[in-house]
Image (cartoon, rainbow, N blue to C red):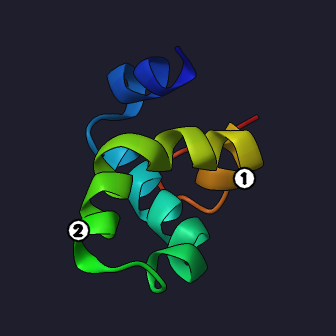
Amino acid sequence: MRILDLFLLEGAQVIVDLCIAMLQKQYPILVLMEELELMDYLKRDIIIDVFQKWDFKDLLGESPIVKLS
């Protein structure tokens, strides 16, 4: 819900910033995967894993677009 609110308020850059943050947070795991395993993980599991480990403010806290209060 918060992502949709920010998308409507700030625009598409919020989605880009969120995706970049998710990839940065999961980088140590991603580099160890084989190609097919990586594609499956990115399609299905990355969102669940990221939001189980980090909250929304951790992901978008460094975004120049989003001002979290």
Task: Report helix, strand or loop for mark 2.
Answer: helix
Q: Earlier in the sequence, mark 2 or mark 1?
A: 2
List x then y, in percent, for residue 57: 72, 44
Q: Which residue is mark 2?
A: 36
The amino acid type found where label 1 is placed reads Asp
Image quadrant occupied by the C terminus = top right
Please state if 14 lies on the left or on the right of 26 as rendered: left
State the residue at coordinates (49%, 42%). Answer: 47
Query: Relative to 16, is 2 above or below?
Result: above
State the residue at coordinates (38%, 34%). Answer: 10
The image quadrant that residue 19 belongs to is bottom left
Q: Which residue is mark 1?
A: 58
Along the viewing direction, whichever of 69 and 35 lies nearer the viewer: 35
Please state if 57 lies on the left or on the right of 45 as rendered: right
* Distance from Cα at disc 2 to Cα at disc 1: 29 Å
The image quadrant that residue 11 belongs to is top left
List x then y, in percent, for residue 62: 63, 62
